[in-house]
Amino acid sequence: QVQLVESGGRLVQAGGSLRLSCVASGRAFRYYAMGWFRQAPGKEREFVAAINWSGEGKRYADSVKGRLTISRDNAKNTMYLQMNSLKPEDTAVYYCAADYQAYTVGVVVPIEEGEYDYWGQGTQVTVSS
């Protein structure tokens, strides 16, 4: 079992920056690929960014490339999402998720919701225009 807790969401003006954090507890964090997803009002949850267990592999949704950066610190059991040049369309609840990769060979970065085993409760990001 892994417990995930997101933080860092708040109201910010367009063009501003935020850093979201996701702290994991339970089974060894280093065995998990981690991802960020978001859900805007009235829309389905969508993929934002993901990173494999070692940090070697990263993937981003086209809508956030060049503006959002995913990273992780395995010593602190924490994943981050640095969000720059924020836009009103980035407004959503942001969820972190964990995918167990202890037996995964090679660099695999999961981007589908169904690949993830554990989810956090979410943190609200609101970008005002």
Image (cartoon, rainbow, N blue to C red):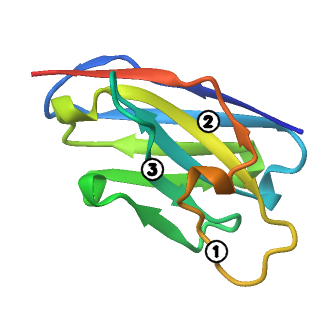
Amino acid carrying mark 3 in the image: Phe
User: Residue at left 40%, top 44%?
Assistant: 82
Provide the residue designation for mark 1.
108
In the rendered image, which quarter is residue 9 located in?
Answer: top left
Provide the residue designation for mark 3.
47
Q: Nearer the viewer, mark 1 or mark 2?
A: 1
Query: Mark 3 and mark 2 in contact (Cβ < 8 Å)?
Result: no
Query: Mark 3 and mark 1 in contact (Cβ < 8 Å)?
Result: no
At numbered mark 2, what does the secondary structure look like: helix, strand or loop? strand
At numbered mark 3, what does the secondary structure look like: helix, strand or loop? strand
User: Residue at left 89%, top 39%?
Assistant: 1
Q: Earlier in the sequence, mark 2 or mark 3?
A: 2
Residues under labels 2 and 3: Cα distance?
16 Å
Q: Nearer the viewer, mark 2 or mark 3?
A: 3
Q: Nearer the viewer, residue 98 or 46?
A: 46
Quarter placement of the C terminus? top left
Amino acid carrying mark 1 in the image: Val
Determine whether 66 is above or below 119 in the image: below
Provide the residue designation for mark 2.
22
Q: Nearer the viewer, residue 44 or 126?
A: 44
